[in-house]
Image: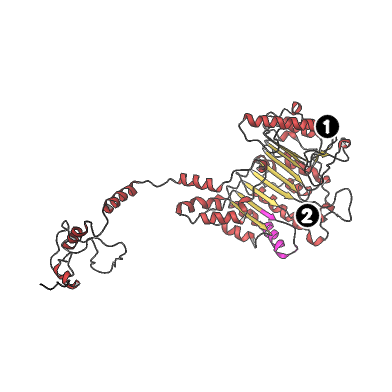
Amino acid sequence: MDPPQQPATPSKQLSTLDLGVTPTKRPRDTTVDSSSPASVFDDCPSSETFSIFGGSPPPRSTPSPLLQRQKSVTGRSLTAPPGKRAKRAGSSKKSKSLPFLPNELWDMIVDFLVDEKPREHVDIFHDNGHEEPQFQQTLSNMRLVCHAWNRAIAPHVFKRLSAIIGRTFNPLDVVFEASQTQWAPSVREFRLGVVGPWHPVKEYERYITNLVNGGLAVLLTRFPNLRTLQLQSPTVIAPYTPECQITGALLAGLTNSLVHSLRFVPLSNLRCLHLTLPVTAEFARFFKSDSFAIHFGELMSDLEELHLVINDDSGKDSFRDLYHPRSIVKARYPQQDYCVYFTNFIHYAKNVKILSIDTRAPLDVSNLDASSMTKLKSFRLARVEIRWETLRDIFQACKDTITRLEFEVVRLKSGTWADVFSLETTSLRNLEFFHCARGTYASKGESATFLGFTFIPGTAADLETLNREDWLKLSHIKWRVSRNRRAKNLEECVHTKYH
């Protein structure tokens, strides 16, 4: 009986095989040293290949004995699974033939992710949601997806810039750095001013000083495509101490920085202007003439949106309340005495389409001129006093274009709300949105006898009136607006939902 044969050692198995072959392809995880004269993994011609064990290499078309034996034993190739080479070859051909997505398609995808659907009941306000830190962080993260997204997201990151003191430290320095980048032409909205109450610190005074010394003018020259400009003054609410109020000199400097910049820096694309000032007397600074400056009427004629806010909520003009005193600026410049500058400022906006007037304290705006509102599409009044005759003239001027109408705590000095809501008189055929909250009457007007009240304090009723005709006309205008929306296949509005 023959003894069992011992298995050959690996060295003997290698000696019986013909390993005189040079690999013709380099493994994917192998690096190449360009300084060496030759490499065993280079795709050299057959005349330059050599064997590490000696002997002449076989032709490239014939596989080595090691590959032939491995294929005969396992039935598959050593280097790749069956069909893998064919798949790789096919995929490589397909990858070369697939076109890249065009830049326009990437822009559409990014715009769909970034731009939010406007909410109809607040779309006449300046939307500051894009200025929130969470939204800016989302934009920064989206820039890290790929090069195409970085190119498409960058204009959205610089689309809205804010240099508001009270929110960040040295906001002007950050905006100056952004204005020196290649994305400065992408800026469409720019906001400056003071958020919240005034603080008597050097940082606040230095901020206004930099604006007055030409900082705002330099920034506007670097934003040629600017469409929206917003100036916000500090809020003045129940100022019991003079230290927490902005002085008249600093307020004048803040307003003059904007006035001079608009007069000497041509902004041909400016279409929207937001102004939040404490008193109406500040609007008189826009009417100062200068032979070298841009005419005020030419500047205002290009505006399509005008949002004006009087944010001084201190004591009334007529008397001084011990528990609710007037501010320093308001005591010197009463609101009603300088209201003519406020209304004349609106009169110069001949092509305005969206007009919003909001006052923190009651202000009589009955001298509004309706001749400049022939193209008005959206009209909003909040916490003002007005005569019915003024509203009638405005409605008659924009009866073919007006689509939105909103009243919030509006006090009528003459006429009734039934006259305001009478569509037979106003002929507002295209009205698609209507909202009225706490419409009432002035306590010293001709219609003071209809002054009503609400039984539940703190609630926002549609009307506070004792005239029953007001409620009937209110229901009629809601029904009319709902019918117009259904005719245009629009969703039911929450404010004009008619049951």
- Residue corresponding to mark 1: 468
Cα gap from disc 1 to disc 2, whole angstroms: 38 Å
The residue under label 2 is which amino acid type? Val
Q: Is residue 352 visible?
A: no
- Taking the magenta stretch, the answer to whether it contains residue 213 is yes
Residue position for label 2:
236
* Label 2 secondary element: loop
Foreground pick, 319 / 447: 447
- Which tag is nearer the camera, tag 1 or tag 2? 1
Q: Nearer the viewer, residue 345 or 420?
A: 420
In what quadrant of the picture does the N terminus appear?
A: bottom left
Q: At x 75% / y 26%, what residue is drawn? A: 424
Q: Circle 1 sits in a helix, a strand or a loop, which is it?
A: helix
Residue 396: x and y in percent read: 73, 29
Q: Is residue 205 left or right of residue 315?
A: left
Disc count in the image?
Answer: 2
Magenta region, residue range: 192-214
- Between discs 1 and 2, the one toward the N terminus: 2
Residue 72 visible: yes
Q: Position of residue 231 (x, y in %)?
A: 69, 51
Residue 340 found in image quarter: top right
In the image, residue 345 above or below residue 323: above
Task: State yes or no: discs 1 and 2 in contact (Cβ < 8 Å).
Answer: no
In the rendered view, how is the structure colored? secondary structure
Query: Quadrant of the image for the C terminus?
Result: top right
The structure residue drawn at horizontal position 79% and vertical position 54%, both measured from the top left corner, is 237
Q: Quadrant of residue 174?
A: bottom right
Q: Does 259 lie within the magenta span?
A: no
Residue situated in front as seen by the camera: 260 or 306: 306
Q: Amino acid at mark 1?
A: Arg
